[in-house]
Image (cartoon, rainbow, N blue to C red):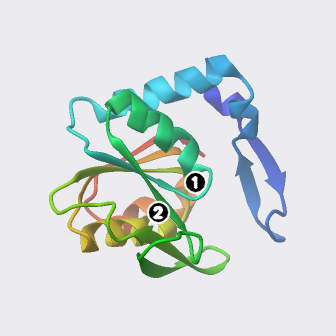
Amino acid sequence: MDLKTYIRDVVDFPKPGIIYKDITPLLQHPEALRKALADLKASIGGLQIDKVVGVESRGFIFASMLAVELQAGFVMIRKANKLPFKTLAETYSLEYGQDQVEIHQDYIKRGDRVLLHDDVLASGGTAYAAVRLIEKLGGEVVQCNFLLELVNLKGRKRLGEKEVFSLLSF
């Protein structure tokens, strides 16, 4: 099954000049969804994972499923002012502006082995901010895991020596 056929291009979204990779067609097909989840899980191999961190909002989809599959906790990283408890924040640049993400301060414990998941690796700004939040709380990011990667934006470079897995490359 070619999962790329389930990714739709949306031109000029969220602003002119951007070609948005829409994963919602993949989510509509149970067999594609199951295959994507199985392949993402297989990339982890025998790594011990204590927490799976998903980045708002599409990252929550596979991150929560991976947490169940790995018998690990699920942690959300959200946009600013969306979490109700004490948070730690990180500001970052992305390919079309600047944003901020937050995590609850008590969700990651020192020594937790963390799988970071988001739907898309683009310029790496969001993923880098998420890694910084996890590490500030004492967690160890053992893999950065993505459904798809926009290779020409060189997001891997931003993540330095972190292990990165992307199921699909565009």
- Closer to us: 156 or 120: 120
Q: Which residue is mark 1?
A: 150
Say few, some or many: other residues with alpha carbon within 10 Å of mark 2 (under 14 / 14 to 19 / 20 or more).
Answer: many
- Residue 102, placed above or below residue 8: below
- Residue 119, placed above or below residue 133: above
Say few, some or many: other residues with alpha carbon within 10 Å of mark 1 (under 14 / 14 to 19 / 20 or more).
Answer: some
SS at badge 2 = helix
Residue at 71% from the left image edge and 38% from the top image edge:
7
- Closer to us: 20 or 57: 57
SS at badge 1 = loop
Residue at 35% from the left image edge and 44% from the top image edge:
73
Image quadrant in which the N terminus is located = top right
Circles 2, 1 touching at the beta carbon (< 8 Å): yes
Q: Which residue is mark 2?
A: 155
Q: Can I make out residue 167 in this image?
A: no
Q: Where, by quadrant of the figure, is residue 111 drawn?
A: bottom left
Residue at 22% from the left image edge and 61% from the top image edge:
109
Q: Can I make out residue 25 in this image?
A: yes
Residue at 63% from the left image edge and 23% from the top image edge:
32
Q: Where, by quadrant of the figure, is residue 153 drawn?
A: bottom right
N-term mark: 2 or 1: 1
